[in-house]
Image (cartoon, rainbow, N blue to C red):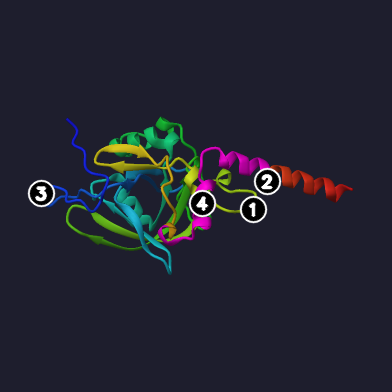
Amino acid sequence: MEKKISGDPRQETSYRSIGATTLLAPLPVVMVTSGRQGEDNSNIMTAAWSGIVNTHPPMLSVSIKPSRFSHDLILEQGEFAVNLTDRRLVRAADYCGVRSGRDVNKWKEMGLRERAIPELSCPGIDSSPVTLGCRVHQHLFLGSHTLVIGEIVCVQVREDLFDGDGSLHLERAGLVCYSHGVYQDLNRVLGFFGYSVAREEVLKKRMLAYRPGRAEAGKRKSATQDGQGRKRNHR
């Protein structure tokens, strides 16, 4: 039977110690691409141990087992790309995490297309919502994994995630996370950065923008405004 806890965070809660383990969740599901675009060694591996580690210059990290096919590709070539995963890509992400590039061509098996990344020779995944192209800054063997730190040199974002005014809405991407062996989507906005101290009118306005259906309404409004602008210009 499922045990329920009180909705009051101030109420004392019971816990169970399970020892020292890597139980950190949720984690991003990212598809790491490496090798050279259009060549046989181009590969995709799925990783959950990834995250931003620095702002200036922008850097991220990925932990990779030395036995993985991508491990030596990345260290020898000195570059890789991190591709975010949405609902449409989750099956491909799972496949790329359980099959080795030594044995199969994951691009062909999953019907994925390569996309060129400016300044880099490794490919991105064409349907990914966001691709972060990186050059290896440094790497450190920790025991079971090698921590690879990459400097982000290029970020590509899918066009449909922008409004007409240029604002980015990543909450619309249908991104997927990984939690203790399970893939889950991020389908509800609970708040935004600083919402706990925001003025009431700001909070209402911002949260209203995240409601289902608001995205399409915003796109229609932008399209209407663009059309009216073109008509005025032709008069």
User: Mark 1 to mark 2: distance in Å?
Assistant: 8 Å
Tell me which numbered mark, 3 or 4, is placed earlier along the sequence.
3
Estimate how packed mark 3 is, as few (under 14), some (14 to 19) or many (20 or more) residues with alpha carbons within 10 Å. few
User: Which residues are drawn in magenta?
Assistant: 196-222
At x 70%, y 43%, the residue is 223
Q: List x then y, in percent, for residue 209.
A: 54, 47
Relative placement, left or right, of 213 versus 80 is: right
Tell me which numbered mark, 4 or 1, is placed earlier along the sequence.
1
* Residues under numbered marks 1 and 2 in contact, where contact means CB atoms less than 8 Å apart: yes
Q: Amino acid under label 3?
A: Ser
- As helix, strand or loop, the secondary structure at mark 3 comes to loop
Question: To which residue does mark 3 refer?
Answer: 17
Tell me which numbered mark, 1 or 2, is placed earlier along the sequence.
1
Relative placement, left or right, of 91 versus 214 is: left
Question: To which residue does mark 1 refer?
Answer: 165
* Residues under numbered marks 3 and 2 in contact, where contact means CB atoms less than 8 Å apart: no
Question: To which residue does mark 2 refer?
Answer: 222
Question: To which residue does mark 4 refer?
Answer: 204
